[in-house]
Each structure stands twice: as C-alpha cells, then as structure tokens.
Image (cartoon, helix red, strand yellow):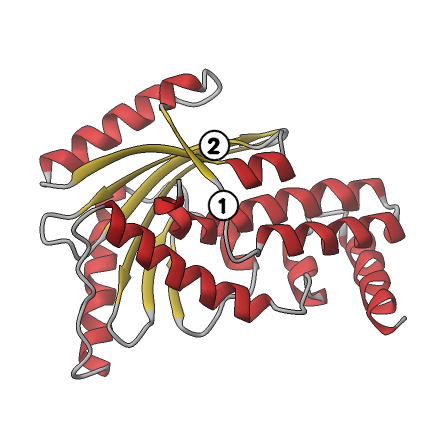
C-alpha cells in the first residue's frame, strides 16, 4: 500500500534509532557499523511496501489510543482513511510493532497520522501532522521527540513536542507554523489532499527528498551522540569511528 509513504519520515527514524540503541549496547563496533549502514540503505530506499491492516490486528498496541484519537479528529471534521503497516520496516526490524492510521482535515490541507510504536524497551504514541506546499517543501509538527535526534532535509520543516503535550496544543501549533510559513513564503500555496491518491503522491514526493538527502550517507557521529543513552557515549563514539573507517576503506 503506497498511499502511506509519508509516514516513512518518522517510522524510518524510529527504526534507525531503535537499531542504533540495540547495536551500541553490544559494543561490537565493526558489526554494529556494518549493520547500521546496511539498514540505512534499506530504510531510505525510494519505495517501501505497505499493506492494509486494522489496528485490532495488533494486540500489543493500545486500542483505546486509536479509538479515542479517531473520535477526536472526526469530531473536528477529519476523515479517517484506515490503517496500514509498513512491511519493509517490519522485515528490517520485526520487533518494532506499529500501525498507522491516517486522517485528512476538512479542507484537505493537513495529513494527520496517529500510530503506536512498541519495541523492546520502547513504547511511544505518536501524533504526526504534515502540510505540503506548492514549492515542494513540507511543514510537520509531531510529538515524536526522539526523531529530532536525526538530521532532516532542509525542505522539511519540523517542530517537535514532548510526548506529554496535549494533542490539541500540537494541532494548534501546526496551524501557527503553517501560517508563519505562508507569511515568509508569499505566493506559495498549500497542496490540497483529497484522497488516497493524493496521499500517495505527496508521500512519494517527500520520500524522494529524504532519499536524496541520505544518498551515500549513514548515521553521522553527531546523530549517534544524540541517540546514545547515558552510559552509551563511549560505545557510540566507537561505532562512529568504525563507520568512518569503513567509509575510507
């Protein structure tokens, strides 16, 4: 199901972060560096495979989160376009359970995704909002704070909030960010999303930006330092040294 490529932005980041945290715990620098480089190539591939699912297919996920968020968004006039799983990321990281449910605002200007991510030692409920503009740039607002640890293309303008931030505050902040962007970019208009085909096209455009940004690159030393938990700093430096060594060889 290609219509949800847009979610690759955050799911890719979660997958990479979880992978990095796992491999640096093992302190096997050469193997860790090779694994990270290989998985980066897969996760930032131009296309990912999706399949339609239902959140209820995943007992590990919080069903009340999906139900309550959907009811709230629908009360605001958002349209629910169903659930999906990223098969490519599942194959890369089978321990990362997730299910995307995506919604479109009444005027078609906002693509709002909700998803619960569960993995060993990790549990996050994400509210991720995106608006695309006619110049090919994007404004995104999210409570996926961990995602801020990874570098992002300059065409994608992120604003991150803590997981504890009320969802209505995140939605209001996104509206403010969109208005500010339009003020500083006169003549640029919002790309209107009318249905799944539009979601697919928008997602493909954003993925092309991210793929180009990551072409020939793996996780940087700075990103590894930001991702590392307390006590993992030395391991992160060791992995970074090995990645740089492999690039030179």
Number of other residues with Cα within 10 Å of mark 2, as a class: few under 14, some 14 to 19, many 20 or more: many
Is residue 203 left or right of 149 when viewed as pictured?
Answer: left
- Residue at (46%, 50%) from the top-left corner? 8
Residue in the image at 69% along x and 60% along y? 225
Where, by quadrant of the figure, is residue 101 drawn?
top left
Give the structural element (helix, strand or loop) at label 2: strand
Q: Tell me the tag on residue 11.
A: 1
Q: Position of residue 230 (x, y in %)?
A: 71, 48
Q: Judge from the rendering whether residue 112 lies leftward or rightward of residue 33; answer left or right.
A: left
List x then y, in percent, for residue 88. Answer: 56, 40
For residue 41, the mark is none
- Note whether 197 is above or below 101 in the view shown: below
Which image quadrant: the C terminus? bottom right
Mark 1 Cα-neighbour bin, 10 Å: few <14, some 14–19, many ≥20: many
Q: Position of residue 18 (x, y in %)?
A: 63, 42
Horizontal side of residue 104 vs 26, given as left or right: left
Q: Give the number of marks.
A: 2
Q: Quadrant of the N terminus?
A: top left
Cβ atoms at labels 1 and 2 below 8 Å apart: yes
Which residue sits at x=86%, y=61%? 242
Nearer to me, 166 or 132 = 132
Point out the tag, 1 or 2, that comes first from the N-terminus.
1
73 up-or-down from 128: above or below: above
Could you tell me which secondary element the residue under label 1 belongs to?
Answer: helix
Where residue 189 sits: x, y (%)?
Answer: 17, 73
Residue at image position (20%, 78%) is: 188
Residue hosting label 2: 98
- Rounded to the nearest angstrom, the CA distance separating label 1 from label 2 is 9 Å
Quadrant in the rendering for residue 82? top left
């Amino acid at each position: 199901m290609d219509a949800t490529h847009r979610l690759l932005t955050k799911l890719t980041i979660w997958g990479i972060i979880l992978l990095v945290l796992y491999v640096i715990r093992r302190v096997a620098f050469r193997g860790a560096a090779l694994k990270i480089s290989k998985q980066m190539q897969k996760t930032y591939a131009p296309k990912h495979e999706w399949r339609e699912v239902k959140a209820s297919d995943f007992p590990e996920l919080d069903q009340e989160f999906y139900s309550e968020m959907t009811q709230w968004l629908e009360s605001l006039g958002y349209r629910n376009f169903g659930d999906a799983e990223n098969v490519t990321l599942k194959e890369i990281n089978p321990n990362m359970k997730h299910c995307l449910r995506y919604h479109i605002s009444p005027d078609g200007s906002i693509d709002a995704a909700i998803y619960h991510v569960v993995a060993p030692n990790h549990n996050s409920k994400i509210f991720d909002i995106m608006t695309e503009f006619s110049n090919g740039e994007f404004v995104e607002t999210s409570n996926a704070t961990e995602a801020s640890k990874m570098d992002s293309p300059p065409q994608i303008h992120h604003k991150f909030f803590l997981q504890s931030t009320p969802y209505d505050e995140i939605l209001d902040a996104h509206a403010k960010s969109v208005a500010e962007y339009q003020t500083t970019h006169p003549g640029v208009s919002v790309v209107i999303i009318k249905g799944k085909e539009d979601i697919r096209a928008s997602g493909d455009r954003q993925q092309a930006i991210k793929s180009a940004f990551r072409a020939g690159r793996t996780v940087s030393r700075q990103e590894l330092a930001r991702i590392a938990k307390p006590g993992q700093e030395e391991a992160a430096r060791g992995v970074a040294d090995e990645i740089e060594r492999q690039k030179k060889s």
